[in-house]
Amino acid sequence: MIQSYEIQICLGSSCFSRGNREVVQVIRDYLKKKHLDDKVMLRGARCMDRCSEGPYLIINGKTFVKTGVQDVEKLLEKELAEPGK
Ligand code: FES
């Protein structure tokens, strides 16, 4: 069962323009659809100085790079279902 999670998404200008603008919306929709809004804290972050690897995303301390809209739902399913794997 899901406890509490934290997703940090880089909203710095590079990541934002390279896809995180859409990714953040996909994450919001996913959390709503799965009724996880109250269990997952979604936070926007400033540039993490890793723009070349962006769009940049951190789920429970685990870093994901170059995550596109097409990958994010699968990623959330995996990461929110199997913490720490
Ligand atoms: S804008 Fe995201 S790491 Fe720089």
Image (tube, grey):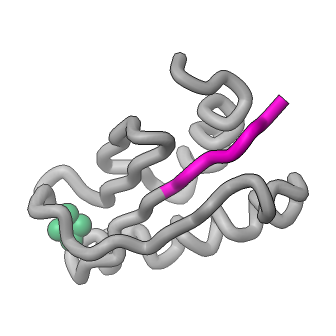
How far across and how far down the image is residue 39, in percent?
Answer: 76, 54
- Give residue 25's quadrant in the image: bottom right
User: Residue at point 31% right, 45% down?
Assistant: 65
| Residue 48 vs residue 77, the one in the foreground | 48
Vertical placement of 59 versus 82: above or below? below
Vertical placement of 13 versus 28: above or below? below
Q: How many dots with numbers?
A: 0
Instruction: State the residue lying farthest toward the top.
Output: 85
Instruction: State the residue lying farthest toward the front.
Output: 3
Q: Is residue 53 shown left or right of residue 6?
A: left
How far across and how far down the image is residue 59, in percent?
Answer: 48, 45
| Residue 80 vs residue 6, the one in the foreground | 6
Vertical placement of 25 versus 64: above or below? below
Q: Is residue 53 shown left or right of residue 16?
A: left
How far across and how far down the image is residue 44, in percent?
Answer: 43, 73
Q: Is residue 25 shown left or right of residue 23?
A: right
User: Residue at point 61% right, 26% down?
Assistant: 83
Magenta run includes residue 54: no
Vertical placement of 58 versus 54: above or below? above
How far across and how far down the image is residue 6, in percent?
Answer: 55, 52
Write the start and end of the magenta stretch as one range.
1-7
The N terminus lies in which quarter of the figure?
top right
User: Residue at point 40% right, 69% down?
Assistant: 19
- Give residue 38's quadrant in the image: bottom right
- Give residue 17's quadrant in the image: bottom left
Ligand 1 image-quadrant field: bottom left
